[in-house]
Image (tube, rainbow, N blue to C red):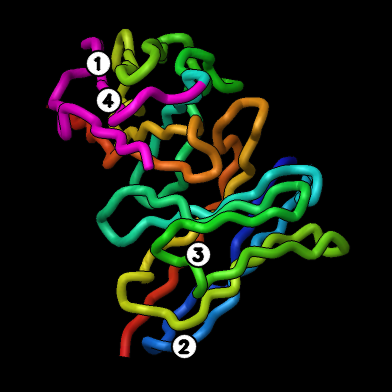
Amino acid sequence: EIVLTQSPGTQSLSPGERATLSCRASESVGGNYLAWYQQKPGQAPRLLIYGASSRATGIPDRFSGSGSGTDFTLTISRLEPEDFAVYYCHQYGSSPMYSFGQGAKLEIK
Amino acid sequence: EVQLVETGGGLIQPGGSLRLSCAASGFTVSSNYMSWVRQAPGKGLEWVSVLHTSGSTYYADSVKGRFTISRDNSKNTLYLQMSSLRAEDTAVYYCARDNPSFKAFDIWGQGTMVTVSS
């Protein structure tokens, strides 16, 4: 099973700042099938990025994904108040035994 | 509108059984891969099971032999039959459309809470 490790666990930033979230895999993610989700308290996760760098429908362009192999990054170029949430990476490469990262929290400074 | 609605959660004693349902609208369950994902209180996401369009099923090691995923095409509904429940199965259970084109879970339900406790 591929283990995904997200860092940092928590980031304290201000609206307007840039956020960089990292996801490292224990082995190469096949096809770079790495997705990112956003989850707010009491809500279901929402797909942001799939295939490492493709934005899902309706996702603002301030969200971008990059990376390949074992190292992936989610970047939020200018934080909006609604972006403070928990983010999860997810590998689909070794389907069907999927795995998620442990989550990374963005909090308002 | 594309939507998933889970029902069936509740309080159940250890060793008991429970069946969760996930009703889909706006798309056909049998034409899509469908997964269950759970989230223990205050914890992260854990994939539980997937049902492929072919009927093939796969499970996380933590639930293998205890949980069964299935669907009813006439009701456009996905199910998760859970048995021999343990305290560590306590979680919000989400169903999600597992989109093989995106290689991601693109539609999620709102979740249903399962609490295993005596």
Dot 1: what SS? strand
In the shown orientation, is residue B85 left or right of residue A107? right
Are both tags, 2 and 4, on one chain? Answer: no
Between disc 4 and disc 1, the foreground one is 4
Q: Is disc 2 in contact with disc 3, using a CB cutoff of under 8 Å? A: no
Please name the amino acid that badge 3 sits on. Thr
Which chain hosts label 4? A
Which numbered disc, 4 or 3, marks the residue closer to the eye?
A: 4
Mark 1 on the same chain as mark 3 = no
Q: Find disc 2 in the rendering and name its residue.
A: B16
Instruction: Specify the segment rendered in magenta.
Output: A1-30
| CA gap, disc 2 and disc 3 | 17 Å
- Secondary-structure class at tag 2: loop
Chain of the residue where label 3 is placed in the rendered structure = B
Q: Which of marks 3 and 2 precedes in the sequence?
A: 2
What is the spatial separation of the Cα atoms under label 1 and label 3, in whole angstroms?
Answer: 32 Å
